[in-house]
Image (cartoon, grey):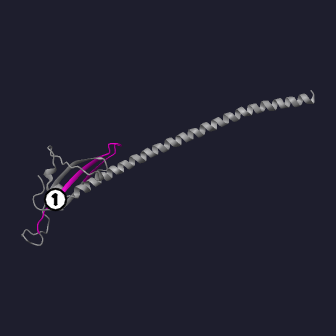
Amino acid sequence: MSEQSLVSAALMSTALFRRQQRGAVLIVALVMLLVMTTLGVSTITSTNITLQLVQSQQRQQEASQAAQNSINYLLSDLDYYVNNSSYLDGNGDFTLSFPSNVSNGMAVTINGLQCLLQATPAGCSLIEGSSAPCHPEYYWEADVSVTDNVSGASSNIVEGFKFRYLEGYCPA
């Protein structure tokens, strides 16, 4: 074999080797691209799920806050207790429309507002005009539910409280 034929055989084998390498580099690059795309898609999916969980938790907290706001609104006006019967509907359920800043745009339902007990406090005087008149203590219970119609989040609060007022304001 001549020197020229050896050189040409070497060039041909180098060219063949390069073609085989180009194919391997292409396959490795495609596999790496596939791995990176899969990681990117899984990261985006994980982020979306986390965002949905956070939004759900936030709406649940807003529903709880709206329920507490509703209880506070009920406690803000003694008329709801003194004239309780004027707030009852035909079925005997307590009804009240809450302002939007109280309900936060959610559906508020008063499941119950009832006087549980009227009690005479200890240490009061039954003598009219005394410095310690006997005003009974009224024990009430409020049960409020709030539902967010958009997300379905809901909260229910049952709270008891007492106050003193004139005799005869605990409906039977």
Amino acid type of the residue that numbered disc 1 sits on in the rendered structure: Tyr
Name which residue lies at 12% across and 64% down: 135
Instruction: Work out whether 21 lies above or below 111.
Output: above
Q: Is residue 167 left or right of residue 47?
A: left
Where does the image place residue 121, in percent across and percent down from the top left?
14, 65
Q: Secondary structure at mark 1?
A: strand
Q: List the residue tagged with mark 1.
A: 138
Q: Position of residue 50 (x, y in %)?
A: 46, 45
Residue 43 lies, in percent from the top left, at: 53, 43
Q: Position of residue 91 (x, y in %)?
A: 15, 43
Residue 67 appears anywhere in the view: no
Q: Categorize mark 1 by other alpha carbons within 10 Å: few (<14), some (14-19), many (20+).
A: many
Which residue is most to the front? Answer: 100
Which of 121 and 27 lies nearest the eye of the viewer? 27
Residue 34 visible in the shown view = yes
Horizontally, is 22 left or right of 95 in the view?
Answer: right
Q: Is residue 148 magenta?
A: yes
Q: Main secondary structure of the magenta part?
A: strand
Q: Tell which residue pokes out farthest to the top in this image.
A: 1
In the rendered view of the protein, which quadrant contains the N terminus? Answer: top right
- The image quadrant that residue 136 belongs to is bottom left
- Image position of 115 (left or right of 146): left
Q: Residue at x 64, y 35 (%)?
A: 30
In-front residue for pair 112/104? 104
Q: Residues in magenta?
A: 133-158
For residue 109, side relative to residue 118 (left or right):
right
